[in-house]
Image (cartoon, grey):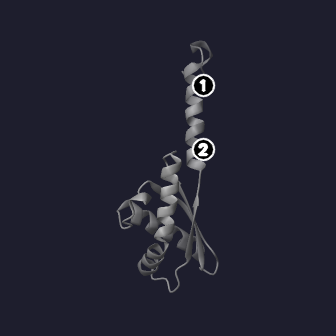
């Protein structure tokens, strides 16, 4: 139970840091934290994040921004959560949200192009 609680606390704190501008790197502004998975010994944390912008440059910049402020994030999380040893962070792009948006757009396009008599949403 402890690991799950730490996962959630880190996710919430990291999201808060991004949302309220505590991370001063503008490249991380479009980032949304999806989940955090801390190792049992608390030495590593995998942070899955998404960027709602499909532009590869924005995604690359967001990833670089997160990686460049890893030390700041580690120190801040350690202080906020009173952890004796804060984990090393690994940031992983989660394309699930983007993939779902593409599927939704494709379904809407199919619905839009269907003849009115064949639609099942009406």
Quadrant for the N terminus, please: bottom right
| Residue name at image x 60 percent, y 13 percent | 117
Is the residue marked by circle 1 packed among few (<14), some (14-19), or many (20+) residues within 10 Å? Answer: few
Q: Height in image: 55 above or below 115? A: below
Q: Is residue 11 visible?
A: no
Q: Height in image: 52 above or below 88? A: above
- Judging by the rendered image, the residue that carries numbered circle 2 is 99
Residue 2 placed where, x, y %? 58, 76
Image quadrant assignment for residue 4: bottom right
Residue at the farthest front position: 57
Q: Nearer the viewer, residue 12 or 96?
A: 96
* Real-space Cα separation, disc 1 to disc 2, in angstroms: 17 Å
Residue 34 placed where, x, y %? 54, 58
110 left or right of 20 in image: right
| Residue name at image x 60 percent, y 49 percent | 96
Q: Nearer the viewer, residue 10 or 75?
A: 75
Name the element at disc 1: helix
Q: Nearer the viewer, residue 62 or 88?
A: 62
Residue 44 placed where, x, y %? 60, 75
- The earlier-in-sequence mark between 1 and 2 is 2
Name the element at disc 2: helix
Is the residue marked by circle 2 packed among few (<14), some (14-19), or many (20+) residues within 10 Å? Answer: few
Q: Is residue 3 visible?
A: yes
| Residue name at image x 48 percent, y 58 percent | 62
Quadrant for the C terminus, please: top right
| Residue name at image x 53 percent, y 84 percent | 85
Image quadrant assignment for residue 108: top right
Residue 91 placed where, x, y %? 56, 65
- Judging by the rendered image, the residue that carries numbered circle 1 is 110
């Amino acid at each position: 139970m402890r690991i799950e609680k730490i996962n959630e606390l880190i996710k919430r704190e990291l999201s808060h840091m991004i949302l309220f501008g505590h991370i001063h790197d503008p490249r991380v502004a479009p980032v949304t934290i999806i989940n955090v998975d801390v190792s049992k010994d608390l030495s590593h944390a995998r942070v899955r994040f998404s960027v709602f912008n499909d532009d590869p440059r924005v995604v690359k910049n967001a990833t670089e921004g997160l990686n460049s402020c890893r030390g700041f994030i580690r120190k801040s999380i350690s202080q906020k959560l009173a952890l004796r040893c804060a984990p090393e962070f690994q940031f992983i792009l989660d394309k699930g949200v983007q993939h779902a948006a593409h599927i939704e757009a494709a379904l809407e396009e199919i619905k839009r192009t269907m003849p009115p008599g064949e639609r099942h949403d009406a």
